Amino acid sequence: MSEYEVSLTTMTYGGEVLGRLPDGRAVFVPLALPGEKVRIRLTEDRKNFARGMLLEVIEPSPLRITPRCLHFGYCGGCHYQHMPYEEQLKAKSEIVRDQLQRIGKLENIPITAAVGSPKPFYYRNHVQFGLTEDGKLGYHRLYGDEIFPIQECHLPVEGINIIWPQLEFETLLEIERVAIRQGAGDDIMITLESSDIDPPELSLEELDVSVVHLSEAGALVMAGSDNVDMEVLGREFRVSAGSFFQVNTEVAGRMVEHLLAGLDRLHPLTRDTTVLDLYCGAGLFSAFLAPRVGNLIGLEESPAAVDDFVENLDEFDHVSVYEGKVEHILPLLNMQADIIVVDPPRAGLTPAALDEILKIAPRVLAYVSCDPSTLARDLRRLTAGGYRLENVTPFDMFPQTYHVECVALMSRIEK
């Protein structure tokens, strides 16, 4: 592939910086900063754009700092360790704005500054590792799909960073991923994700942890328990192996506080309020909404998460949950709601789910997103469907990476 010297201008979603090739095409370069002149080798050469591997920083930005991790630049997990944390927050706010403008075709976007993480490092309560061919834990390379063994990682919380270096597996085990989650009481749960329904034979006596084998056959407890307790804003949540829960507990708390205040401002939360919590997971938002409303219904596709939801909200008689796809269940409920909260996966809302939400026509809609591009796509459709975007707030759930969580609040335009 060809090599070029390029001047870079703008941060883009995906951890890359935009520049221009001599022929005018856009080129996207990771591990760089705006204002830098760099030497690159093209890794992807398309008709209208290209991507390049950073070979040399010829003229560095004054903002460039030394990354903390020895794997930075080789590992595909982190993208921003060469940036001061305050600059990361500014970049994420601007990237969200850009996505909403370009993809969502939105104007005069009411976006607030990104809410930072109290801990820019050592914040992840849940980490997934791949396995190398010789059974060592590792991550995907930045360039290529292979797993490489890691010597350090500065994203997991302390307990996970103590446990993972002690783990090593036989080469013939059919384990696709190893997930480690730390609970509020420092309990550790290791989940072995496998396509083989038969659990591997492992020696676990020396580790004071829970171990769960997760396959198509379900979750099989090999040691300890099949769940840990997480804590957000003083409330505990049971989270089972395979259930989703926010990886940055302190930022999750800030999101909950922001969501409650925003909803209450747009539609006061009272005993007359009905809330639909779509893609409700283990019940993070529902648990804090339930004490303030009269009727709350959760929808969730994951059986494990539904079981957790039932356990976590068992104290409330006015709360119910349905298991299945949102677009399948909503038509069957045939109900109205004052408020709908959605927290879909990275792919965003399906067209069918979005259609059903517009049919219900809640007065207020809160959209929690982990991907600003799909958020922008869906906000475009929702605004066309009669909703006004009141506010978008980015939350830095994932410091040192390009990923960003957003909470978008919308109100129905009364005709």
Image (cartoon, helix red, strand yellow):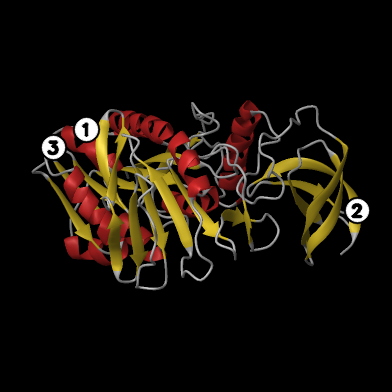
Q: Element at badge 2?
A: strand
Instruction: For the residues labelled 2 and 3, say whether their Cβ atoms are less than 8 Å apart.
Output: no
- Which residue is under mark 3? 272
- Viewer-nearest of labels 1 and 2? 2
Amino acid bearing label 2: Tyr
Residue 92 in picture, x, y percent from top left: 59, 37
Gap in Å between the C-alphas at discs 2 and 3? Answer: 63 Å
Q: Is residue 215 left or right of residue 102?
A: left
Please identify the quadrant where the N terminus is shown. bottom right
Q: Which residue is mark 1?
A: 269
In the shown orientation, is residue 21 left or right of residue 190? right
Residue 137: image quadrant is bottom right
The quarter holding residue 183 reads top left
146 or 259: nearer the eye? 146
70, above or below 113, in the image? below
Mark 2 crowd level (few <14, some 14–19, many ≥20, 10 Å Cα): some
Q: Earlier in the sequence, mark 1 or mark 2?
A: 2
Residue 295 shows up from this direction: yes
- The three-letter code of the residue at mark 1 reads Leu
